[in-house]
Image (cartoon, grey):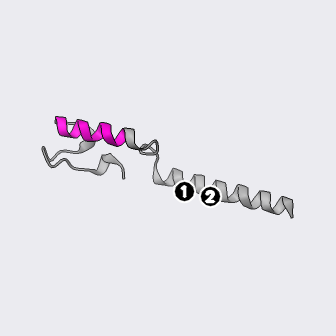
Amino acid sequence: MTYDRLVCANCAGPVSEGRCPVCRASRERMQRQSPFTDLNPMVLIALLVALIAALVLVAHQTV
């Protein structure tokens, strides 16, 4: 999950804006948790498709 869509329960603002200390703490925690938080889902799908294509190519060459 990305923090750009989360709403803070403390200030009712977007967590990505970091309006209050709770927002800023949540944003920092989420950024440290996963290196993939900034990746767009479409980029992840494209990487998955490229990986599958590479595996199919390698399997085809070894046969």
Point out residue 18 in the picture as x, y percentages from the top left corner.
Answer: 23, 36
Magenta segment boundaries in residue numbering:
21-31
Point out residue 42 in the picture as x, y percentages from the top left corner.
Answer: 50, 54
Q: Main secondary structure of the magenta part?
A: helix
Question: For the residues marked 2 and 1, what is the alpha-carbon distance in whole angstroms?
Answer: 6 Å
58 displayed left or right of 20: right
Q: Within the magenta stretch, is there residue 20?
A: no
Q: Within the magenta stretch, is there residue 29?
A: yes
Point out residue 43 in the picture as x, y percentages from the top left corner.
Answer: 52, 50
- According to the picture, the residue beneath numbered tag 2 turns out to be 49
Q: Amino acid at mark 2?
A: Val
Tag on residue 9?
none
Residue at 31%, 40% (x, y): give it. Answer: 29
Q: Residues within 10 Å of mark 2 (few under 14, many from 20)?
A: few
Q: Which image quadrant for residue 38?
A: top left
- According to the picture, the residue beneath numbered tag 1 turns out to be 45
Q: Amino acid at mark 1?
A: Ile
State yes or no: discs 2 and 1 in contact (Cβ < 8 Å): yes
11 displayed left or right of 47: left
